[in-house]
Image (cartoon, rainbow, N blue to C red):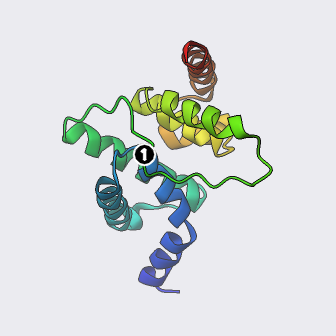
Amino acid sequence: MNREDEFIHLIQQNQGLIYKITTIYTRDREEQKDLYQEIVYQTWKSFDQFQKASKPSTWLYRVGMNTAITNLNRSKKRVTAVPLDGMELDFADEMESGMEERLRSLYAEIRKLGLLDRGIVFLFLEGKSHDEIAEIVGISSSNVGTRLSRIKDKLRKGLQTN
């Protein structure tokens, strides 16, 4: 497989991952589309540097999250909350009625976190281990555990006040 085909395959295999990153770090559909394109562009620019020492998805998480954070910092945006209007959440019919509201509250509290903490909780919710999160965000595994503990406390307190 040549370099371009390998890149296209990587993007196709990880479209959902890129979409999730753009959802967490943007406010509206247009920003989301722009960030998606920027992540793909930055991935292409750094594709030759991918050493395959880590899994492709781990590397793509890192590129995507760094791109999102860089774009937010560059444009001097301070995202404290992202409205959920227009965001569709698919739930099974048998799900209890209050579950959707609790989920909305949780996402609203997550969006109040700082950029790095938001990324850490996103990776945690994706099922990544502390070691994987540490590799992606560039901090120690013990720091990930400490931050997650503090994040959980913040989320608990935020949800209790709602």
> Furthest residue to the bottom?
1
* Residue lying at the far right of the rendered structure: 94
Q: Which quarter of the rendered picture does the C terminus lie within? A: top right
Residue at 47% from the left image edge and 83% from the top image edge: 5
Amino acid found under the numbered disc labelled 1: Asp
Give left or right: position of 69 versus 73: right
Residue 8 image position (x, y, % from top left): 46, 78
Q: Is residue 114 visible?
A: yes
For this orientation, the residue located farthest to the left is 75
**Residue at the (29%, 53%) spot, across then down:** 31
Q: Position of residue 101 (x, y in %)?
A: 61, 35
Query: Could you tell whether 83 is left or right of 10 in the image?
Result: left
Q: Quadrant of residue 150?
A: top right
The residue tagged 1 is 85
User: Residue 127 falls in which quadrant of the image?
Assistant: top right
**Where residue 114 appears, x then y in whole percent?**
41, 27
For label 1, count other residues whose C-alpha is less than 10 Å away and answer few (under 14), some (14-19) or many (20+).
few
Residue at (35% x, 56% y) in the render: 29
Whether 159 is drawn above or below 41: the answer is above
Element assignment for label 1: loop
